[in-house]
Image (spheres, rainbow, N blue to C red):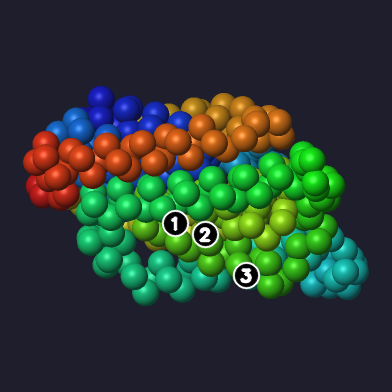
Amino acid sequence: MSWLESFILGLVQGLTEFLPISSSAHLRLTAAFAGWHDPGAAFTAITQIGTEAAVLIYFRKDIARILSAWFGSLFGKVPRSDHDAQMGWLVIVGSIPIGVLGVTFKDQIEGPFRDLRLIATTLIVMGIVLGIADRLAARDETGGRHRAVRERKSLKELGVRDGLIYGICQAMALIPGVSRSGATISGGLLMGYTREAAARYSFLLAIPAVLASGVFELKDAGEGHVSWGPTIFATLIAFVVGYAVIAWFMRFITTKSFMPFVIYRIALGVLLFVLVSMGVLSPHAGESGG
C-alpha cells in the first residue's frame, strides 16, 4: 500500500465511519474503483481505532462519568440503580453479540462477505430499513392531521432487552455495507428512541467492540498488503477527519432527516449492481494480490 492510498483510505474511513453509509463498504469500493488491492478487514479494523479515539475525546465527559459510576457500583459506593452505572453494564451487554459473532464468522468477514454484490445488497436493504425507521421517528415527532405528537424514549429508559437488541443490530455491521451506526441507529429508532439517544448509545456501544477488534487485528499489520507505516498514517487521518464528522453529525441529527443517507445508499447499491452486471467491475475486484 502506497502513502497516497493510505491517505485516501484514511480520509474515507474518517468521513464515513459515523455516517449511516458503511465505512467498510466505502473502503472496499474505493479500492475497487481505483484499481487498488482490497485494504482488507485487518486494515479496516485498525483504522477504526482512529475514529474511535475521536469518539473517546468527543464523549470524554460521558465516558468518564459512566466509568466512574460503574466502578463505584462494583464496590457499593454508587447505587446499582444509578443511570450511569447501568449504562456501563448495558454497554457490556450490548457488546456481547458482536464479540461472539465476530470470532465465529471471522473467515467469512475477511472473505465472502467482501463480495461487491453482497455489499450492494446490504447498502440497498439497510437503506430501506433506515428510511422506514426515520419515517416512523419523524411521524412521532411531528404528529399529523389525525395524530398527536408522540414522545420518544431517552437513554434513561434503556434496559437490558433493548441494549441486547442494539448489540444484535451492531453485530450486523460485520457485513460490509450494513453500517455500524446505520444498523444501531435504525434499531434504536424502531424501538422508539429519539434520534439523539439512538446515535449517542450507538457511538458509546461501538467503543469496546471497535477497540477490541483493532487490537486483535494488530497482529496482521505488516503482513501482506497491510503495513505499519501506511496503516498508522491512515489511522491518524481517520482520527482527525472523524472528530470533525462526529461533531457535525451530532448537530445534524437533532433537526434533520436521515433521508439523504437513505437515497445515497440505495443509489450507490443500484449503481454497484449495474457496474458488476455490465462487467465494468468484478464482484471480487481488488481482492487478489498482496
The kind of residue tagged 1 is Ala
- Badge 2: few (under 14), some or many (20 or more) residues near its Cα, within 10 Å? many
Say whether disc 3 or disc 2 marks the residue closer to the N-terminus: 3
Residue at numbered disc 1: 173
Mark 1–mark 2 Cα distance, whole angstroms, equals: 6 Å
Mark 1 in CB contact with mark 2 (< 8 angstroms): yes
Residue at numbered disc 2: 170
List x then y, in percent, for residue 113. Answer: 28, 59
Residue 175's place in the image compared with 9, above or below, is below
What secondary structure is marked by label 2? helix
The kind of residue tagged 3 is Leu
Which residue in the rendered view is the most extreme toward the front?
146
The kind of residue tagged 2 is Gln
- Badge 3: few (under 14), some or many (20 or more) residues near its Cα, within 10 Å? some
Q: Nearer the viewer, residue 229 or 41?
A: 41
State the image quarter where residue 219 is shown.
bottom left
Residue at numbered disc 3: 164
List x then y, in percent, for residue 245. Answer: 55, 30
State the image quarter where residue 216 is shown.
bottom left
